[in-house]
Image (cartoon, coloured by chain):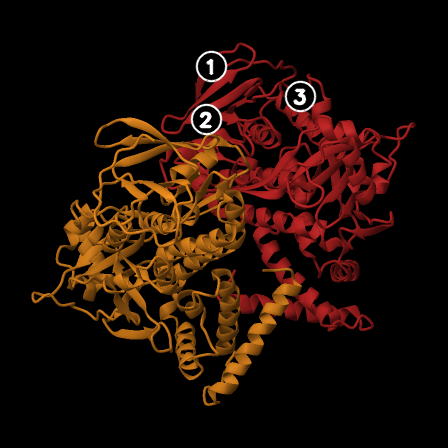
Chain colours: A orange, B red
Amino acid sequence: MNSNTNNKKQNKKVLPLGEDIGGEVLIIGAGLCGSLLALRLAQRGYNVNVYESRSDLRTTDISAGKSINLALSDRGFKALRLAGVEEKARKICIPMYGRLIHDLEGNTFASNYSGREGEYINSISRGELNGLLLTEADLYDNLTIHFNNECTAVDLENNIASFYNHNTKENFKAKADVIFGTDGAGSVLRKSYYLERKFLFSFSQNFLTHGYKELEIPPSKDGNHLISKDHLHIWPRGDYMLIALPNLDGSFTVTLFLSYDEGEYNFNNLTTEKKIREFFQKQFPDALELIPDIASEFSNNPTGALGTVKCSPWYYQHKTLILGDAAHAVVPFYGQGMNASFEDVTVLDGIIDEHNGNWETIFKEYQKTRKEDADAIGDLAEENYFEMRDHVSNPIFKQKRALEVALEKTFPTEYFSKYSMVTFNEDIPYHTAMLKGRAQDKAILNMIADNDIDLTNDLKSILATIKAETKEILDEDKVAGLK
Amino acid sequence: MNSNTNNKKQNKKVLPLGEDIGGEVLIIGAGLCGSLLALRLAQRGYNVNVYESRSDLRTTDISAGKSINLALSDRGFKALRLAGVEEKARKICIPMYGRLIHDLEGNTFASNYSGREGEYINSISRGELNGLLLTEADLYDNLTIHFNNECTAVDLENNIASFYNHNTKENFKAKADVIFGTDGAGSVLRKSYYLERKFLFSFSQNFLTHGYKELEIPPSKDGNHLISKDHLHIWPRGDYMLIALPNLDGSFTVTLFLSYDEGEYNFNNLTTEKKIREFFQKQFPDALELIPDIASEFSNNPTGALGTVKCSPWYYQHKTLILGDAAHAVVPFYGQGMNASFEDVTVLDGIIDEHNGNWETIFKEYQKTRKEDADAIGDLAEENYFEMRDHVSNPIFKQKRALEVALEKTFPTEYFSKYSMVTFNEDIPYHTAMLKGRAQDKAILNMIADNDIDLTNDLKSILATIKAETKEILDEDKVAGLK
């Protein structure tokens, strides 16, 4: 195999799971999903070569990675636990216990993510978590990461991937028994599925009308957080939204979600410092005070697109499989993108347990098990876009959240909101959580709208009514042949 | 403009709509949608050049086109009326008043499409209808159709389309003020949108697990139809389905819908005459008797894929627009593919009335008006796949259909089934029909399942209950933020 290895290895671990079973595995992309997959397959004894287009984020300028933080929750932790790195990851987490909603007048309202103790999400730096996984990967003799090698195409029939080395400026090819594509939303392997037309490839990419831009609230002079670090902050304004997640250094990464070309203010017309300041002054005056460099950050930081990718099949014969964003990129509004990608590794690992060595069966079973859940989190994330930018400040939705938190507090083993099922219950598949959660939401929202909930009544009877209504909604959908 | 004109013109008509307004219009594809669009734009005075990859279907061997028939209904007729060709089309129609369902034992059950008089769909030959439109198009001096010219790419920025001439084997380019892509499900213009990446292009192609194959029931010796020509015949078998539509020559075009690779019988394993006959003998014994050449037809006729295409945007600036299957290919199970494409022309024509000359506004308004309706018919057609192959033989669905026909008969101006709204009410947009129709279906199915409908009760009170339940379902979805 022609390759260009950049990383150094020291203190190699002994393989924990027994003998090398001799499979040559090639992974395209050493991002979050690819690194974790590589680690897990190395632990299983496979010979793993990972090719990553960028340079090693642990040794290059960290600032690019630093500004991006993500929400890590229980599905993610389950996968990290499987690979033995959960505790290391927890050390770089900042718990966020709920949303803190900022209104136009600067008032704030807290809304907990759960009524149960110990249920919270975590702000974590993408770069630091990725680095942690790469450092762990370096401990395995049978795992090599080749940085600065960009995949340009995959020959599906012969299982040969082509690469361009950014250092040597040379093109080369690499062959393997199995090729995994964890090369993100713009996956080259997925593109080969689409363009080679070897099979009927169902595929969708769906962009929202809004893009996003990242900004920064710096730490205070003494290095502390200027607003609560225990919350995910939201400034919901209907047509646009600002959010902020805390970083370990006292700063916050702020993300503006805004239309490209609709409405009075949009990315296309916010082109002068005057107009940018006017927009923030009118819509986010309290946030504006915390972002000193707003005009230069707004001009210099890129505007990103928000897209959902779904496709099928994810695999070709016994040869290739795509996972993570490459197979199912989602918009960021449920905080589940990374968690879903990590969960892919958990699910695949369980199926390898049953069919080790038989890749075609593994891939088939994996897709059969995982596809409806990946579709569900894509749909849930798009729906939450509307909930976050709009519904969180809607009175009926607020009442619903308050009621759900009270129910979870009082009946911690009996009531689980949709958000809790998705975020904190890693053993409930996304698709199940979506169907039950939607029915439950519909039941509660309609009971509140119809004044059918007497809040002076005891919570126990309210819970019973919600359960009965939810069941009826699910039954009626079933009779009508709806999902 | 470099072009290669194959058609001959005679007896040119005087432009009916006044002066030539000077717009150079290029249309890619002279199929059903492209021919009708060309005709209508010529009637409006535009200079229209249409490039079609195949040869003129009126002068080449007709057999390829002859075997494919389609269902034409009220949305299609409305568009044909606009172009002045409705009556000519009606002359080559065979009315189908309902479904005739064939069970395994050879019993048949009729199920009318409507309880109202004069509501029926029509079997029509794709080739003959297309030929009729081309012949009409030939009457316009300002409309030229260039056959055997295959579009290979479109330069979006400069509005230049590239072609390959199958006769001269030469490549050439053509420029126009506006380019329309009516080049079907595999649209080259749509592919340019995807590959040129000039804008965020949301796109999906979704294939069913089943493909289709066309077979033929020939006419009787004296040229008559061997089974009722007044029905669309269905042999629903859950995992697969056979349908048949009548042709004017006494034959039927039969279509088998079957999985590629799942189940005991599928396209991949039906490879011998023995197995093909065994399959039909077990599943469609009455149909087998009517298809003498089953084995050779099965082996020689191609297996087609069933895909739904959705995308957005459909246009680029003031320069290009895709319509018909190029913008929204649908599966054939609602009999609306051609009707939806023709309705595109009706909708576009209405918007040209308002904004003639301003193509960017026309395209924007057209997409705004039309997109949710195109999406809706795509979804309805996929849903009907399950209804046709499965539900038509389900007792609750059968009771529902019988009740709906009775309601339409008794209250012809008050009750409209989903099927009637979609098929016979060309002034109800698809999206409206879908939402109301789904709610109505859900109400009726649940009332039947719960024994809430007392059929000894008078129909008037049953109708009132259905209307109230339907309203409640729509209200509850609205409160829950669902569509």
Residue that mark 3 sits on: B57
Q: Above or below — where is A334 with respect to B317?
A: below
Give the residue type at disc 1: Asn
Question: What residue is at 22 percent from the left and 28 percent from the top?
Answer: A168
Q: Above or below — where is B1 with respect to A63?
A: above
For the residues labelled 3 and 2, the Cα–Cα distance comes to 28 Å
Label 2: which secondary element: loop
Q: Given the image, what chain letter belongs to the residue carrying mark 3?
A: B
- Which is more foreground, mark 3 or mark 2? 3
Residue B202: percent from left, percent from top:
43, 43
Give the residue type at disc 2: Gly
**Numbered badge on residue B23:** 2
Residue B125: percent from left, percent from top:
72, 31
Give the residue type at disc 3: Leu
Label 1: which secondary element: strand
For the residues labelled 2 and 1, the Cα–Cα distance comes to 25 Å
Name the residue furthest right: B222
Residue B319 or residue B195, whichever sits in front: B195
Residue that mark 1 sits on: B171
